[in-house]
Image: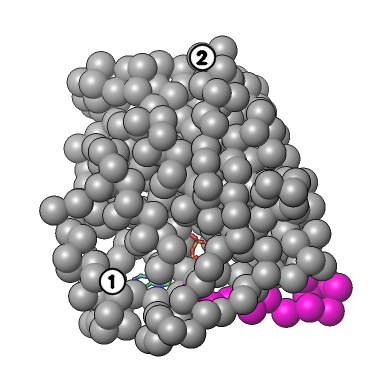
Amino acid sequence: MSASANASPALDAIAPRDKADILARALPYIRKYHGKTMVIKYGGNAMTDPALQQAFAEDVVLLKLVGINPIVVHGGGPQIDNALNKVGKKGHFIQGMRVTDSETMDVVEWVLAGEVQQEIVGLINHAGGKAVGLTGRDGGLIRARKLKMLDKDDPAKEHDIGQVGEIDKIDPSVVKALQDDAFIPVISPIGFGEHNESYNINADLVASKLAEILKAEKLLLLTNITGVLDKQGQLLTDLTSQRIDELVADGTISGGMLPKIAGAIDAAKCGVNAVHIIDGRVPHVLLLEILTDQAFGTMIRAR
Ligand SMILES: Nc1ncnc2c1ncn2[C@@H]1O[C@H](COP(=O)(O)OP(=O)(O)O)[C@@H](O)[C@H]1O
Ligand SMILES: CC(=O)N[C@@H](CCC(=O)OP(=O)(O)O)C(=O)O
C-alpha cells in the first residue's frame, strides 16, 4: 500500500508548510515519550467501526515506530453478548461485571482470545506493526482468583458471579520481552487460577494493573463515550479520587463505568503519571492524545 492510500481531499487542501508544521509539532511529545510505555485499553464498544479500527491500528504502529511502547489490552463485551445470543443465552451484569457460569466462560474465552484478539492483531500487522496476541495464561502473565463481590448498598450481602476473577499477581516478563523485541503485545483479559481454572477479568482492571506493574507513563482507556459525565450529561474533564467516590455514591457513575473508574483511580494512585478515559469514536484519538496538546475526555488524578 502506498503512503498516499490514506490521503483525503481535506488533507490535500492543507498547504505543505502547514503540513510540515503539524508534523514538527509532534517532536516535543516524541522526545518526551520516547522509550516510555503506554498501556491502551481498547474497549469492545470502541471497536465496532472498521474505519476507526484501522485508524486505531495505524496509531499503535506509528507510536511503536517513533520509539514509544504501546501495550494493548482489549475488551469485547458487545462481541461476547452477540456470541451468547447465538447460543440462546443473554449477558447479565452486576456492578459492571458479567455473571460468568462455565458455559459463558467458554464463550468468553473463544470470543476474546479468538475472534477479537486475532482481529486486532491482524489489523496492527496489516498496518505495518508486529503484534502478538496473548492471554493472561501466556508466560504466566495474569494469575487470578475468584472475585468476591460485595453488594454496593449492603456490604453484608455477597454476589456469586461465577468465574469472574480479580488479579492476584501479574508476571510481566513475557510482555517486557516482547516489547523489547519490537513486538506489540495485544492482551486478552483472561487469567488462570491455582487449579489452572480460567477467569474472566474486566479488561479495564487488567489494563490498569498492567500499567501500574509496567510503570507506564500513560494509561488510556478508550471507550464509546466522551468521558465521565455528570448527572446533567456534561463532560467532567478532571476527576480526583474524592470526587469519584461522591459520583459513585450518588449513582452518577454506574454500569461499565464502575470498573473503569476503579481501575483508573488505582493506576493513578500507584504512580501511573497520566490516566485518561477517552472517546474511542474519535478517529486517531491516540495520536491526538499522545502527540498533540489537544486534551480529551476525563483525566483521573489521585488527589
Ligand atoms: N457517569 C458516567 N459517565 C459516562 N459513562 C457512564 C457513566 N455511568 C455509566 N456510564 C456507562 O459506561 C459505559 C462505558 O462502559 P462500557 O460499556 O463497559 O465500555 P467499554 O466497552 O468501553 O469498556 C458508557 O457507555 C455509559 O453507558
Ligand atoms: C468480568 C467481565 O465483565 N469481563 C468482561 C471482559 C471483556 C471486557 O471487559 O470488555 P469491555 O471492555 O468491552 O467491556 C466481559 O465479560 O464482558
Q: Is residue 256 left or right of residue 35?
A: right
When the figure is inspected, residue 123 is found, relative to residue 227, above or below; the finding is: above
Specify the segment rendered in magenta. 82-95
Disc 1 CB within 8 Å of nearest ligand 1 atom: yes
| Residue drawn at the location 21% of the way across and 75% of the way down | 246
Q: Amino acid at mark 2?
A: Asp
Which residue is under mark 2? 180
Instruction: State which quadrant residue 48 falls in.
Output: bottom right
**In front of the other: 187 or 151:** 151
Which residue is under mark 1? 229
Q: Is residue 243 left or right of residue 185?
A: left
When the figure is inspected, residue 118 is found, relative to residue 88, above or below; the finding is: above
Q: Amino acid at mark 1?
A: Leu
Q: Secondary structure at mark 2?
A: helix
How far apart marks 2 and 1 lie (CA) works out to 38 Å
**108 part of magenta stretch:** no
